Amino acid sequence: MITILCSGSRGDFQPYIALAQELKELGKAVRITGMKEFESFVKSYNIDFYPIQADFKSLNVDENMLKEAQSADNPLKMLLTFNKMKKYGLDIANEFYAACEGSELIIYHPGCTIGYFAAERLGIPAILASPFPIHKTKEQTSVIQYGRVKSTPFKNIISYHMLQGMLWLASNNSVKYLWKKEFNGLPKNFGKPYERHTNKRQPAVISCSNFVFKRPSDWNENIHQYGYWFVKEPTDYIPSKELSDFLSSGEKPIYIGFGSVFHKDQKETLSKLIIEALSKTNKRGIICGMGKIDNLPSNVIAVDSLPHTWLFDKVAAVCHHGGAGTTSAGFKAGVPSIIVPFANDQHAWAHRAYDLKVASKPIPIKELTSDNLAEAINYALQDKIVQNAKKLALDISSENGARDCAKVIVDSISL
């Protein structure tokens, strides 16, 4: 059994589901471990799930702190928020460790470093699987600094120290707590495990297209990046009649949705702003994930969450928060992006999409108005941006990151 330790939001789980799907196709038994709220989502892809019974509610996690985490728009705020959140990891450390027992190999998200140390103690391999480039390089800036600072070899290395340091800060206390409580001391070689890929038995795998961020030439040969990890939907999605009729009743609409970073207290302000921007551009729109919106004009429809893989190639452009998964889905669909970053690495994906000339200039959520959203929509729909987006999608289609990384993982077991 291969066990994948995962954390984060629904979008964070998707690339690991894709990896699990490919491991199953290669004949491996595999399961994903994470908060129990994601159990039905993961199982809907016919992937086994080991639920962590603790959740934000049972842990009494401060809702305001969660908002802070989702709106940290600079590295200092991110660091302070990660520091506040670390205490909650103590209560779930034993459950993550229990999930590792009986496994032949552990795959861990960079925020779940307990997987590395549990595997070491259990005498089995551990593989770091990251949804973004995480390893130090002189060639490009990390996802917490890209677009914010000028790229230089020194600044680039420092930016990865910062990224790894924040992820380590969020998870190292849980390792300390469990080991001192259960094993009377710290693990041997206790420290950040992100650069420990000295042999083919313990490689790292990265979900990122080489046409978006090229694999750095100064990475260790045991760090593998072959493309994004895209989920294969188990069945064809069947839309509601309302949505189907809307899509067929006029020109392709603009998709607008902000995923898990959207809070209900933003609904009135954001929905009004979006409707005004669509009116100013004379475009149709699909507002996703904000619930029912009263008094919508005929050119706008509101829908609940639905598969991006199904919808994105049916729209003219995608407007979103810049989460890594949503951004890659937009790239794959070959449509222009309008990215409104809220926090963390979303700013990097927004800037990268703009630099690749497949998106409008980023609009941080604090600066969003109906006027600049309308301007961004018009920019994204220029012919040159539309053609660039189609070309990027064609390039990305030549990769199969999940399959190739799954092969690396399976090969490591046989060594």
Image (tube, helix red, strand yellow):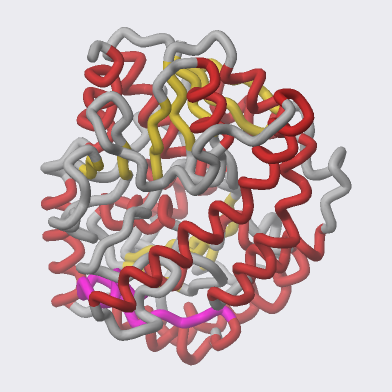
Spot occupied by residue 301 in the image (x, y as percentages of width and height): 55, 60
Q: Does residue 203 belong to the magenta stretch?
A: no
> Is any part of residue 168 visible from this angle?
yes
Q: Residue at x 56, y 46 (%)?
A: 305
Spot occupied by residue 36 in the image (x, y as percentages of width and height): 70, 29
Nearer to the camera, 408 or 295: 408
Residue 263 versus residue 112 in the image, above or below: below
Question: Which segment did they paint magenta?
Answer: 349-365
Nearer to the camera, 46 or 57: 57
Residue 327 versus residue 121 in the image, above or below: below
Q: Is residue 138 left or right of residue 178?
A: left
Quarter occupied by residue 53? top right
Residue 67 versus residue 365 in the image, above or below: above
Q: Residue at x 31, y 44 (%)?
A: 206
Q: Quadrant of the C terminus?
A: top left
Residue 324 versus residue 350 in the image, above or below: above
Spot occupied by residue 221 in the image (x, y as percentages of width and height): 17, 42
Q: Residue at x 46, y 38 (%)?
A: 14
Q: How many labels were placed on the picture?
A: 0
Nearer to the camera, 314 or 359: 359
Nearer to the camera, 111 or 168: 168
Q: Residue at x 21, y 52 (%)?
A: 219
Q: Does residue 358 belong to the magenta stretch?
A: yes
Instruction: Tell which residue pokes out farthest to the bottom in this image.
Output: 371
Quarter occupied by residue 149? bottom left
> Is any part of residue 236 visible from this angle?
no
Q: Is residue 189 left or right of residue 281?
A: right
Spot occupied by residue 127 in the image (x, y as percentages of width and height): 38, 31
